[in-house]
Image (tube, coloured by chain):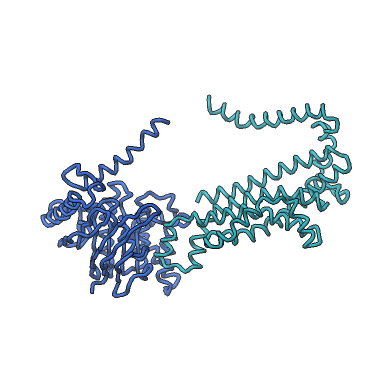
Chain colours: A cyan, B blue
Amino acid sequence: MPTSARDIGRLFLPLVGVVLIGVIWFVASRSVPDLPSPMKTWTESKSYVLQPFDKRGEMDQGIGRLAYYSLVRVSKGFLLGIALATPLGLLLGLSPMLHRMFDPAIQILRPISPLAWLPLGLVVFRKSEPAAMFAIAVCSMWPTVINSAAGVRAVPQDYWNVARVLRLSRFATFTKIVVPATLPYIFTGYRLSLGIAWLVIVASEMLTGTPGIGGFLWQEYNSLIYAHILLAIITIGLIGFALDRLMGLAESRLRAV
Amino acid sequence: MAFIDVSSVSKTFRTDRQQRCVLENVTLAVEQGEFVSIVGFMGCGKSTLLSIMAGLTRPDAGEVRLGGEIVRGVPPKTAIVFQNYSLLPWLTAIENVHLAVTAALPAWTRQRQVDQARAYIGKVGLASAAHRRPGQLSGGMRQRVAIARALATQPDVLFLDDPFCALDALTRATLQQELAQLCAAEERPVTTLMITNSVDEALLLSDRIVPMTHGPRATLGRPVAVAIPKPRTFAQLVHDKEALQSRAHVVESLTVSVRRPRHPQLAPPPIGDIGLTAVRLRARGATAGQVPNRGEA
């Protein structure tokens, strides 16, 4: 029966992939002296995973607690980023002149690494927390800017004609036509932005040494507890995956309209 | 001066490489309360003319006056039904109508606006589908919503841009009859200008039919009056002598304009003895020509 065979494939093939990667990891740990094997990683990380909200010290906390700090920091930076990026993107989409004026600058700012922005943030804000927020916001905002602008430019001529026939004011045209028509594009931007914000968190926590999943990773490297590096890496990946799925869900609900 | 007065309007579309004169020296007068149809072949420039009359496009030369005022931008108390419905997909059927009502009649109370939207959704027979989004409606239902949206704003002038051309033949016939009844049922006379490529549709609805010559450089032919009491039905038109005569006049002026084109290389070759048939065949042939791609894949 082809359907059940496909169901089995859908369930088991991803598992097979994960197991295969585990095997590669195991084999690699045999040949690289300092790389902990999967089993060693588990035994050394057990307490962090099984008591995820324990707090034993500044950096010695359960993985759930560390992830929570990081998520709060990312949320702040991400929200600041999209709060700036959404209006900016809509504006660039509405005005061809502004677009021509700022597009080259955006294309130059976009590829700058978080590692480059963070020291600038530290210089300007003198504290690690606002500096981290600044780095996350400024790195993650570009996909939202670009997508919102593209969304506005993609509003079909038909809808503009509706606005003209109904003689809607500029404001009503914006709220009743432009924003709803652009919303799916904006959310695609948010999804990409959140992905970048999560990438930046590790770098910014490493450099500022603040408690969180990235700060933990860097500290455990310095304390030579290499199994915890792998624990942090896996956690970062799982959380990033979950965030992307959540945003994808929101996005597809919008697209269904 | 007539209520709508189109005088010597010309329009040329320019791209980097070429320019195409779509309309040349078009003149037309429409009286208040009159229903005028402009009949012509696909792509002859009728939609451009309507777009200019409705203030969506600026003419290169000439002017359009509505009630004595020169048209610049869409005038107030004007409604347009577009070919492709142009409903907002994130609003339900009734919300689409309601948005138009609130925009057109801002002085009304909220309750009266809601009632107006509901009444017109009911008039086009969509009361049970009022809360569905356009994506969940068939083409015919969408165009019903678009008609409700236009009439609910209580327009003085209604422009219909080939409103039924995207529909299948059966739905088209039903909707045409319904529109005839709706127009007859309106309390105030609405001056209506319809663009169509169907002579029968024009006969069903119009007081006057104006044939449009085949573009480029399209101009209007001699208007044909249709003196049959309204609302009419298709069944009635088939046997009515007056209707048959008007039909013959329109078809003749259209086919003559095809047979003696000013630009022979651009005019379609007359396949049948009626030009309209010829063009429809050609249009289908053009889409059929793309099929081999699918065959290769």
Q: Is residue A51 left or right of residue B74?
A: right
> Which is nearer the eye, B293 or B148?
B293
Nearer to the camera, A131 or B20: B20
Residue A180: x and y in percent read 51, 58
Residue A72 seen in the current view? no
Q: Where does the image place residue B126, in percent across and percent down from the top left?
A: 37, 56
Q: Nearer the viewer, residue B23 or A30?
A: B23
Quadrant of the rendered structure where residue B69 is?
bottom left
State the residue at coordinates (76%, 48%): A202
Residue A223 visible, this angle: yes
- For the point 56% across and 62% down, the residue is A98
Q: Position of residue A224 (x, y in %)?
A: 88, 40
* Residue B13 appears left or right of A72: left
Q: Is residue A155 above or below residue B29?
A: above
Total marks in image = 0
- Residue B119 image-quadrant placement: bottom left
From the image, which quarter does the C terminus of chain B lie in? top left
Q: As drawn, which residue projects farthest toward the top?
A: A1
